[in-house]
């Protein structure tokens, strides 16, 4: 994320992407701390390594599911949860808020 502020083209980190996807889709986190960590990983991943719109097809439902399990329904609640772990708001807040807005739209009944 810091490379973006320096004007350096972001690196493609395929191994990191792979491990985030694996950890998310194979999640077995029953405890609150594990779910909060997974939520943080997904939001941080979107702000740093997941830049393609098609990645949102699995990312948004996962975030929706975890947020629901944690009882999070507003951006303020999600933001407080993310800030429990290392969070660089100046780099991540806009991307995270946009992702949450897509998640809200996904989980809202039609």
Image (cartoon, helix red, strand yellow):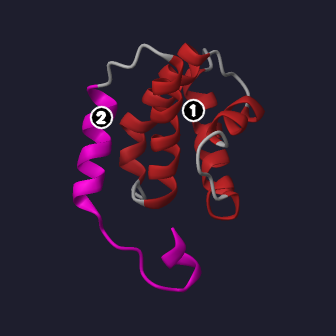
Tell me what residue is drawn at x 39 percent, y 19 percent.
Answer: 29
Residue 96 in percent (x, y) is at 61, 48
Residue 60 in percent (x, y) is at 47, 34
Q: Does residue 108 appear to the left or right of 35 in the view shown?
A: right
Q: Does residue 70 appear to the left or right of 34 in the view shown?
A: right
How far apart are the two marked residues, 1 and 2, measured between alpha carbons? 19 Å
- The residue at which mark 1 appears reads as 103
Q: Which mark is residue 23?
A: 2
Q: Does residue 66 appear to the left or right of 54 in the view shown?
A: right
Above or below: residue 12 compared with residue 86: below
Residue 97: in magenta span? no
Q: Which mark is residue 69?
A: none
Question: Total label count?
Answer: 2
Q: Nearer the viewer, mark 1 or mark 2?
A: 2
Task: Name the secondary structure under disc 2.
Answer: helix
Residue 88 in percent (x, y) is at 64, 59
Mark 2 crowdedness (10 Å alpha carbons): few <14, some 14-19, many ≥20 = some
Residue 55 in percent (x, y) is at 37, 46
Tell me what residue is drawn at x 52 percent, y 56 percent.
Answer: 47
Prevalent SS, magenta region: helix
Residue 12: in magenta span? yes
Q: Earlier in the sequence, mark 1 or mark 2?
A: 2
Above or below: residue 25 compared with residue 2: above
Tell me what residue is drawn at x 59 percent, y 51 percent.
Answer: 86
Tell me what residue is drawn at x 77 percent, y 34 percent.
Answer: 76
Task: Return the residue nearer the eye: 83 or 14.
Answer: 83
Looking at the rendered image, the quarter that the C terminus falls into is: top right
Above or below: residue 61 compared with residue 10: above
Task: Name the secondary structure under disc 1.
Answer: helix
Task: Return the residue nearer the eye: 37 or 67.
Answer: 37
Mark 1 crowdedness (10 Å alpha carbons): few <14, some 14-19, many ≥20 = many
Magenta stretch bounds: 1-26
């Amino acid at each position: 994320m810091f490379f973006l502020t320096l004007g350096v083209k972001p690196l493609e980190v395929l191994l990191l992407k792979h491990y985030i996807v694996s950890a998310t889709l194979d999640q077995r986190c029953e405890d609150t701390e594990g779910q909060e960590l997974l939520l943080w990983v997904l939001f941080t991943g979107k702000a740093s390594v997941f830049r393609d719109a098609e990645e949102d097809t699995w990312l948004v439902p996962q975030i929706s599911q975890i947020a629901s399990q944690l009882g999070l329904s507003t951006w303020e609640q999600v933001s407080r949860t993310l800030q429990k772990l290392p969070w660089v708001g100046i780099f991540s807040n806009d991307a995270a808020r946009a992702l949450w807005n897509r998640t809200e739209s996904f989980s809202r009944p039609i």
